Each structure stands twice: as C-alpha cells, then as structure tokens.
Image: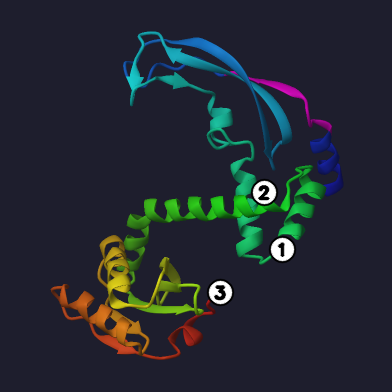
Amino acid sequence: MQATGTRWVRSTAGVLTFVEEPARPCPCCGGRMLVQKTISRCGATLEHGPFQARETVSVCAAGCQQDGLKVTGRPAALATRLPPKGVIGYDVIVQVGLARFVAHQQREEIRVALERQHGIGLSSGAISELGRRFLGYLAALHAARADRLRAALAADGGWPLHVDATGEDGRGTLLVALAGWRHWVLGAWKIPTERAAAILPKLREVVAQFGAPCAIMRDLGRAMEDACDDLVAAVPRRIPVLACHLQYAESWSMPS
C-alpha cells in the first residue's frame, strides 16, 4: 500500500491544478469581492505530494483596507495547507518536527524518508529550517492554548512547579519550568547565565499564564533560591519551596 501511494504521489508531481472557491463577502464591509488576478504557486504536502497550483486572488470591490493594504482573499484550500508565501505544507513541517524532536532521527534519515515515501525532495539544510519552524509554531500554539492548560492544572487541585537550569560553559543556560504531576513543560528558555535577575522574569511569566503553583521544587543553587523566594513573596498565599539537587533526574529525562 505504501508503494502504491508513493507511485500515485509521484504521478501527480508537476500537474497544474486550478484552485477556485465560491466568492465570499469582504470581511470588513460585507460587500462583493472581485477577481484581482490569478497566480501560479508551487507546493508540497504529505497529502498531495509536490504540486503546482493556480489560485485566484480576489479584492474588495469597495476598496476596503486593513493596515494600509487592500483587503484580499485567497482560497482556503491552499491557505490551510501552505504557510503564507511558503512552499512546504504544514503537514510536512509537523512530520519533520516529530521525527527530529520526538523520534530523534537525523536529518538525513528524515530527508530520505520524505523522498521515498512522499516524493518530496529536500536538502539537509531545509530539514533544519523546517525543524526550527516547527518549534516556532509549537511555541505559538502553546501560548495560544495556555488557558486550556491552566484549566487542566486547576482541575487537578493545583500543580507543583519544578524548576531547574542546566548548561555548558560558554553556551548559555537552559531554564525549564515543569508541572510536576503531569510532567508538562510549561516553559523553556535559553538564558545567558544562571542568575536570579534572569530567572525571576521567566518564573513570573509561567505564573501569569498558568496560575500560582501549590509548591515549588528547585535545585540548590543560590540564584534559583533567590528567584523562587522573590516569586512566592509576591503571591498572597503561602507556597512551600522545597529543594532537591537531583529533582529532574528523578522526575523526567531532560533532553541534551
């Protein structure tokens, strides 16, 4: 079945498709949208493989503008599959991100799998760029769904905040905030050095998004101690602060 699907994907590569949808009203005035132009656009998705599409761009007949630009419309069939001005589809970005950061595959492994299974040829550099883009989208989604995560943590009756930092000389420090019972990473930041002045704003960001924890587990560092003490001092209720030098080694496996 995989081989049949691969042959089917390759057979459609380079075929010109026309993307048109029923006219929708202007989102600003509700008036008519007129055809402005048609443009050709290349794309590649796991769903369709490589393709070339010709899409119709419409413009508000009344000349409405947003942020100084004319209000235009494009078919949702492409907008929901390809990033703005992008060629590689969202599903490919997700595939690369999961393979790279969950399955821990090398760039060459990912590149070969995309070529063999979906007929999508990418360079190793493109795989790296898609991985970075995946992380950017994931961070944006994490922030957009913070209210849902906060509700889930509150439904547990509270949550303990595990916070620790690790790094190597000359490479900065990775600071991670973890919801202990669920093992959810609520925040991760690269900070230049492990100092309270750099740690405290990040912890306050976590509390602002997800609420105050029921307890804090930190390491034995002086900077972390000062940052956590300052954090709980600003919270109206008492929050116990505990210390453990090997807390992350016990609770989860931290990526290198």
Q: Which mark is residue 193?
A: none
Q: Which residue type carries mark 3?
A: Pro
Q: Which residue is mark 1?
A: 106
Residue positioned most to the front:
170
Q: Mark 3 sits on what residue?
A: 255
In the image, residue 111 sits, relative to residue 101, either above or below, namely above
- Spatial CA span between label 1 and label 2: 13 Å
Q: Position of residue 244 (x, y in %)?
A: 38, 91
Q: Residues within 10 Å of mark 1 (few under 14, many from 20)?
A: some
Is residue 19 part of the magenta span, yes or no?
A: yes
Q: Residue at x 75, y 49 (%)?
A: 114
Residue type marked 1: Gln
The answer, for residue 28, to whether it is visible in the render is yes
The boundaries of the magenta stretch are: 11-20
Residue at coordinates 73% horizontally, 49% vertically from top-left?
A: 123
Q: Secondary structure at mark 3?
A: loop
Are the residues at dot 3 and dot 1 in contact (C-beta closer than 8 Å)?
no
The percent position of residue 2, horizontal first and vertical second, equals 82, 48
Which part of the image, by quadrant, shows the C terminus?
A: bottom right
Disc 2 target residue: 126
Note whether 225 is above or below 161 in the view shown: below
Camera-side mark, 3 or 2: 2
Q: Residue 61: x and y, percent? A: 40, 8
Per the model, the C-alpha gap separating discs 3 and 1 is 15 Å
Q: Which label lies toward us, 1 or 2? A: 2
Nearest the viewer among 188 and 199 is 199
